[in-house]
Image (cartoon, helix red, strand yellow):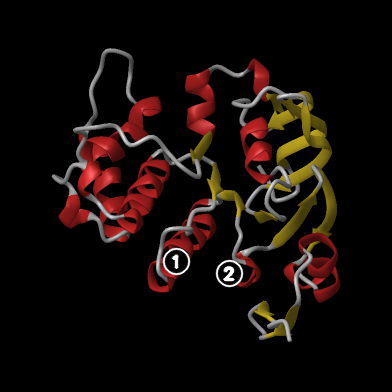
């Protein structure tokens, strides 16, 4: 696969939930190796879009992963291609960090088989890189919000999928761990030709890491381009009703709120 090949392609993607139109005809193409971040105000349809892309949220229109209709893919096949972290994953009671992260290897383990030494090596490497190796025996329910966030990401990375979908991956992390997690994702993207599609609220972090930014508002794509092209004072005033100053730092746009006077 080359960078020109689409990993994700949606055409006229629409979702209605409870009689409300959440997505209203979303067309998007994400190419191999790209990092695309979807932004937008609350209720714009960001999380719903990720769910529709993976076939977990019922939708009309078309959604393709690596050229295949996502609705025709079996769960095990999809799990080999796509690793995702939801905004609020279920925390199973009594499960340790090691066992939870090992679940990321499920799609690679034969039915009725068990994890191999290679599977354990993958999990160990991810735990070390996310500074979780000291937590392997801890039960998930004993961890802090930030520690849990890293464990959820560790499970996704252990899948070694070609596409990584992250819904607000740094919402519970302090700034140091935000950088640590996003730097790791970026390094894996470069080293293993990983494609990343994520949603984020922090626009400055978005501008520092994303290749492309897609702005959703009212369930539709209203802007799609580089961080500097999309994260502008005019766009944020229009779609977020926000008073901000956007400063070009050289590493991406920095969004600074302006206090009402």
Q: Residue at x 54, y 45 (%)?
A: 164
Which image quarter is the N terminus in?
A: top right
Q: CA distance from mark 2 to mark 1?
A: 9 Å
| CB-based contact (under 8 Å), mark 2 and mark 1 | yes
Q: Residue at x 24, y 32 (%)?
A: 93
Name the disc covering residue 65, or none: none
Left or right for 148, reference 76: left
Furthest residue toward left? 137
User: Which structural element holds mark 1?
Assistant: helix
The image shows residue 140 at horizontal and vertical percentages of: 24, 43
Report the residue marked by disc 2.
205
Q: Quadrant of residue 260?
A: bottom right
Position of 101 relative to 116 (above/below): below
Q: Quadrant of residue 254?
A: bottom right
- Count how many numbered circles sit on residues in the image: 2
Q: Residue at x 71, y 24 (%)?
A: 18
Position of 50 relative to 182 (above/below): above
Position of 220 relative to 208 (above/below): above
Q: Residues within 10 Å of mark 1 (few under 14, many from 20)?
A: some
The image shows residue 40 at horizontal and vertical percentages of: 72, 55
- Of residue 241 and residue 113, the one placed in the foreground of this image is 241
Left or right for 75, reference 1: left
Q: Earlier in the sequence, mark 2 or mark 1?
A: 1
Furthest residue toward top? 112
Left or right for 93, reference 154: left
The image shows residue 196 at horizontal and vertical percentages of: 59, 50
User: Which structural element holds mark 2?
Assistant: helix
Q: Residues within 10 Å of mark 2 (few under 14, many from 20)?
A: some
Which image quarter is the C terminus in?
A: bottom right
Name the disc covering residue 178, or none: 1
Q: Residue at x 20, y 47 (%)?
A: 142
């Amino acid at each position: 696969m080359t960078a020109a090949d689409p990993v994700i392609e949606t055409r006229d993607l629409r979702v209605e939930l409870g009689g409300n139109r959440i997505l209203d005809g979303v067309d998007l193409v994400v190419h191999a190796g790209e990092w695309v971040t979807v932004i937008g105000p609350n209720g714009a349809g960001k999380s719903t879009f990720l769910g529709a892309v993976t076939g977990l949220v019922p939708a009309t229109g078309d959604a393709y992963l690596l050229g295949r209709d996502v609705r025709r893919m079996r769960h095990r096949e999809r799990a080999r291609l796509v690793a995702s972290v939801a905004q609020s994953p279920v925390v199973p009671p009594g499960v340790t960090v090691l066992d939870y992260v090992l679940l990321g290897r499920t799609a690679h383990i034969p039915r009725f088989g068990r994890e191999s030494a290679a599977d354990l090596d993958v999990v160990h490497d991810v735990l070390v890189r996310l500074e979780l190796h000291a937590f392997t025996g801890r039960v998930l329910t004993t961890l802090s919000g930030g520690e849990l966030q890293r464990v959820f990401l560790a499970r996704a990375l252990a899948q070694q999928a070609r596409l990584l979908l992250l819904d607000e991956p740094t919402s519970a992390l302090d700034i140091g761990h935000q950088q640590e997690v996003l730097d790791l994702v970026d390094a894996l993207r470069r080293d293993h030709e990983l494609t990343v599609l994520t949603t984020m609220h922090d626009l400055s972090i978005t501008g520092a890491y994303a290749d492309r930014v897609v702005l959703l508002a009212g369930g539709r794509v209203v802007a799609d381009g580089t961080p500097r092209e999309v994260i502008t004072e005019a766009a944020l005033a229009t779609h977020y009703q926000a008073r901000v100053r956007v400063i070009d730092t050289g590493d991406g746009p920095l969004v600074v709120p302006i206090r009402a006077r």
